[in-house]
Amino acid sequence: ISGDVMSDCLFCKIIGGEIPVKKLYEDDDVFAFWDIAPQAPKHFLVVPKKHITGPADLAAEDEQLIGKMMRVGAQLAKEQGIGDGFRTVLNNGIQAGQTVFHIHMHILGGRDLQWPPG
Ligand code: 5GP
Ligand code: ZN
């Protein structure tokens, strides 16, 4: 599933090791790292190695990959001690606050999380 690197994409550079991050997990398909500006005591990102712009750009062939992001993210949440209370977020588009246009799943936990999120 991996491949399709974009040279001007921040997260492709992070995946490629060009920009250092605190890495949590990596395999052939997905990469997870701690967010540089955490919005909760535990806040990390799970991204596919394949460059996909955002949720609105998913193709049928990406379904297995996105399912794997979810499963790996939940497993990492458990390992980080937030398995009983965490939130997954995928922002799509500028109005929703997407700032990096390489699809990423936020996982946040370690505090009470408001609902609705605003
Ligand atoms: P978005 O707002 O696009 O949904 O989320 C992008 C996330 O990437 C933000 O939470 C932001 O803090 C994080 N981020 C942006 N640049 C970097 C970086 O260079 N390193 C790390 N670790 N996180 C980053
Ligand atoms: Zn990318």
Image (cartoon, rainbow, N blue to C red):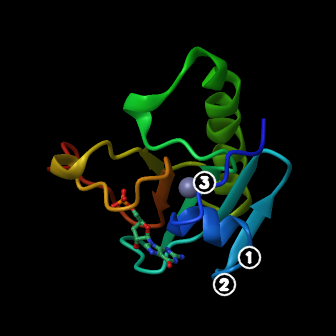
Q: Specify the label residue 17 is tagged with.
A: 1
Cα separation, mark 2 vs mark 1, equals 6 Å
Single out the mark in the foreground, 3 or 2: 2
Mark 3 and mark 2 lie on one chain; the one further toward the N terminus is: 2
Looking at the image, the residue that sits furthest to the front is: 7
What residue is shown at x 62% (from left), y 37% (from top)? 70
Residue at numbered disc 2: 20
Q: Amino acid at mark 3?
A: Val
Instruction: Identify whether 46 is placed above or below 60.
Output: below
Q: Amino acid at mark 2?
A: Pro
Mark 3 and mark 1 lie on one chain; the one further toward the N terminus is: 1
State how many labels appear: 3
Residue at numbered disc 3: 46
Single out the mark in the foreground, 3 or 1: 1
Which of the two residues, 36 or 29, is positioned nearer the viewer here?
29
Picture coordinates of residue 55, whole percent (x, y): 42, 34
The CB of the residue at mark 3 lies under 8 Å from ligand 1: no
Cα separation, mark 3 vs mark 1, equals 15 Å
Instruction: Identify whether 16 is placed above or below 55.
Output: below
Q: Amino acid at mark 1?
A: Gly
Dot 1, crowdedness within 10 Å: few (<14), some or many (≥20)? Answer: few
What residue is shown at x 22% (from left), y 45% (from top)? 115
Contact between marks 2 and 1 (CB within 8 A): the answer is yes
- At mark 2, the secondary structure is loop
Which part of the image, by quadrant, shows the N terminus?
A: top right
Cα separation, mark 3 vs mark 2, equals 15 Å
Picture coordinates of residue 112, whole percent (x, y): 34, 60
Picture coordinates of residue 113, whole percent (x, y): 32, 56
